[in-house]
Image (tube, rainbow, N blue to C red):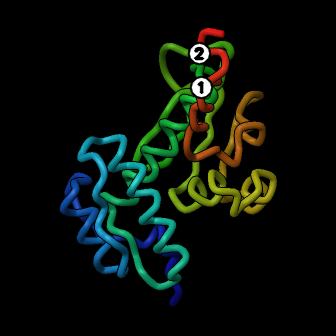
Amino acid sequence: MGHDPVTSVAMSRKSLSLALLNEQRTALGLPAYTGADEPAALRRAALDTVLACIEAGSAEPSRPVVKGAVRFLLDRLAELAPGRSVEVRVPPHAAVQCIDGPHHTRGTPPNVVEMDAAALIALATGRLAWADAVADGRVRASGARADLSDHLPLPIDPPADPPADREAAEPG
């Protein structure tokens, strides 16, 4: 029986930590993560680790690493499409509200997108098209605004700041 490397994860209640991330990276033969030991940076590194697992085809990322990757991608989506009109859910990992427009304050929101971690990662990285994901049931979307196709794939990292124009900075 085949396993999807993103959805078939060990049932762990551990939180993402530098030690856990590096344990996973070592098991994959990846170099240790040496960046900042803060949540956003660890989540970004978790995404890289999950993508390496997908590329390897046989390794299974741990649940905290998958959760970190999902949280990174959902945070990025909310950053790039701010608002509260659509709720995007990736159970059991995380949910976020995004996309400008009318928002709800109580109960079930009128615009909901729900998918598993594997679908989110595939959509966010361009490995899966929105229309295909909806058509084959990997994404369940309800509501008039529950279409993320304009926001996918996600630019994973913010654009680098352009270098300062030296001529403008120097008195002439």
Figure check: 76 above or below 145: below
Location of residue 150 by image quarter: top right
Any mark on residue 169, and which?
Answer: 2
- Residue that numbered label 1 is attached to: 164
Any mark on residue 28, and which?
Answer: none
Q: Position of residue 59 (x, y in %)?
A: 42, 81
- Of label 1 and label 2, which has the lower sequence position? 1
Identify which amino acid the numbered label 1 is placed on.
Ala
Residue at the image position 70 percent from the left and 37 percent from the top:
142
90 and 60: which is toward the camera: 60
Where the C terminus falls, by quadrant? Answer: top right
Figure check: 107 above or below 116: above
Q: Mark 1 or mark 2: which is in front?
A: 2
Q: Where is residue 64 in the image (x, y as percent from the top left)?
A: 30, 58
Residue at the image position 51 percent from the left and 45 percent from the top:
73
Relative horizontal placement of residue 19, taking residue 40 as reference (left or right): left
Q: Within 10 Å of the Cα at label 2, are there few (<14), some (14-19), or many (20+) other Cα atoms?
A: few
Given the current orientation, which residue lies at the most extreme bottom position?
1
